[in-house]
Image (cartoon, grey):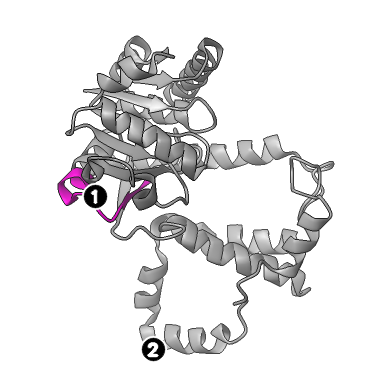
C-alpha cells in the first residue's frame, strides 16, 4: 500500500514514520526540497528512538529505513497513493483548497484524511466530489509515541471507509477511537479542554497555585488514567455516589463561555507561555525542553510496559 503525508512540521514526519511500521510505503510531502529532507531526518530520528527503546522490531525498522521517502512532487505522489493524510496549517480555506485538489487527483477508493485537531471535517470536505472517503485522523502529539488517533466521521463519511482506516491504524500499532459526530474539539480535546478550563479557574480564583494544580493532576487521578477511565471509575465507585458528588460540585465549577480571568490576563500582557518566557510558569527558571523530555520518557516507559504485557 502507498501513502502520502502532506506536511513536514510538528506532526507529519511522525505520522509518516508510523505508517511504515504497519508495512505501508509512505512518502513525506514538503513544499521545498529542504523542508522535505528535514521532515525525513526528523522521522528517522524518531524511528531510531523507538528502536533504542525496543518498541519496533528489526524488520519494522528495516522496512521503514528502506521505504520512507521525502518528495516535493505533490501531484505525482498523491495520485499514486491509496491513503493521503494532510497535516498542514489549521486554516479552513487552505484545507478546503487542498482537499478539493487531492479529491480530483486520486481514485475514489483512496482515503483522504486530515490531522486537524479542531476544524470541521464536514466543512473541509465541502468541495470534494467524493466526501464519503474523507475523514479526520487526529494523531495525538507526539505522533510517534502517543497511541491515540481519533477518527472523526464527517456528515458524508461512509462507515466502511472509517472501518478501513481503523484497520490500517491498528496495523500500524495505534489505538484508534471512532468519533461518530463531527463536533468541535472532537473527543479527546473536549475532555482535555474541560480540565484545562477548570484548572485555569482554580488558579484565577486563588484556590491553588499552578504548581499545585499540575501536581494534583499528575499524582492524583492522572496517575491511574492510563488503565482506568473516567466512566469506569464512576461505575466502580457507584453511580449513586458519583452523581451525589457531581451534583454538589457542579454548581461551583467554572461554566462561563469566556476563558478564565487568569488566561485573559496573561494573553493581554503578552505572556504566552514557554515561547515568550512566562505564562502560568516562569520559563526563565523552568525548562520547556526538560519538561517535554520528562513527558516523552514517561510515555516511552508506559509503551515498553504495555508491550511487555502483551508478549
Q: Nearer the viewer, mark 1 or mark 2?
A: 1
Q: Is residue 65 left or right of residue 225?
A: left
Image location of residue 215, percent across then percent down: 66, 59
One can see residue 56 in this view: no
One can see residue 77 in this view: yes
Spatial CA span between label 1 and label 2: 38 Å
Residue located at (38% from left, 40% from top): 114
In the rendered image of this protein, does residue 80 appear above or below residue 233?
Answer: above
Residue located at (80% from left, 50% from top): 271
Image location of residue 184, percent across then percent down: 45, 59
Q: Is residue 223 left or right of residue 164?
A: right
Determine the secondary structure under disc 1.
loop
Question: Magenta region: which residues?
Answer: 149-163
Image location of residue 15, percent across then percent down: 41, 31
Rendered image quadrant of residue 291:
top right
Name the residue tied to disc 2. 240
Residue 134 magenta-highlighted: no
Q: Is residue 197 left or right of residue 237?
A: right
Name the residue tied to disc 1. 157
In the rendered image of this protein, does residue 201 appear above or below residue 59?
Answer: below
In the rendered image of this protein, does residue 67 appear above or below residue 8?
Answer: above
Residue located at (36% from left, 36% from top): 99
Location of the C terminus (image quadrant): top left
Location of the N terminus (image quadrant): top left
Q: Name which of mark 1 and mark 2 comes first in the sequence.
A: 1
| Most foreground residue, 99 or 158 | 99
Amino acid at each position: 500500500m502507498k501513502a502520502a503525508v502532506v506536511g513536514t512540521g510538528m506532526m507529519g514526519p511522525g505520522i509518516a514514520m508510523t505508517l511504515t511500521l504497519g508495512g505501508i510505503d509512505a512518502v513525506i510531502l514538503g513544499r521545498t526540497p529542504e523542508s522535505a529532507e528535514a521532515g525525513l531526518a526528523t522521522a528517522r530520528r524518531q524511528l531510531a528512538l523507538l528502536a533504542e527503546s525496543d518498541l519496533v522490531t528489526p524488520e519494522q525498522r528495516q522496512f521503514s529505513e528502506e521505504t520512507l521517502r521525502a518528495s516535493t512532487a505533490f501531484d505525482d505522489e498523491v495520485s499514486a497513493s491509496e491513503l493521503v493524510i494532510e497535516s498542514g496549517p489549521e486554516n479552513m480555506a487552505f484545507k478546503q483548497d487542498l482537499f478539493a485538489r487531492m479529491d480530483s487527483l486520486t481514485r475514489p477508493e483512496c482515503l483522504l484524511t486530515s490531522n486537524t485537531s479542531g476544524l470541521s471535517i464536514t466543512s473541509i470536505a465541502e468541495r470534494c466530489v467524493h466526501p464519503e472517503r474523507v475523514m479526520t485522523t487526529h494523531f495525538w502529539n507526539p505522533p510517534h509515541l502517543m497511541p491515540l488517533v481519533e477518527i472523526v466521521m464527517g456528515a458524508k463519511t461512509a462507515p466502511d471507509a472509517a472501518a478501513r482506516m481503523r484497520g490500517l491504524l491498528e496495523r500500524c500499532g495505534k489505538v484508534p477511537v471512532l468519533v461518530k459526530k463531527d463536533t468541535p474539539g472532537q473527543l479527546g480535546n473536549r475532555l482535555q479542554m474541560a480540565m484545562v478550563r477548570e484548572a485555569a479557574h482554580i488558579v484565577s480564583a486563588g484556590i491553588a497555585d499552578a504548581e499545585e494544580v499540575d501536581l494534583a493532576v499528575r499524582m492524583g487521578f492522572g496517575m491511574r488514567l492510563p488503565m482506568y477511565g473516567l466512566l469506569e471509575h464512576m461505575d466502580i465507585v457507584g453511580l449513586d455516589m458519583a452523581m451525589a458528588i457531581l451534583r454538589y460540585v457542579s454548581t461551583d465549577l467554572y461554566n462561563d463561555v469566556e476563558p478564565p480571568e487568569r488566561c485573559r490576563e496573561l494573553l493581554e500582557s503578552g505572556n504566552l507561555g514557554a515561547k515568550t518566557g512566562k505564562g502560568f510558569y516562569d520559563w526563565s527558571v523552568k525548562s520547556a525542553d526538560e519538561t517535554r523530555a520528562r513527558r516523552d520518557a514517561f510515555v516511552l516507559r508506559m509503551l515498553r510496559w504495555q508491550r511487555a504485557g502483551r508478549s
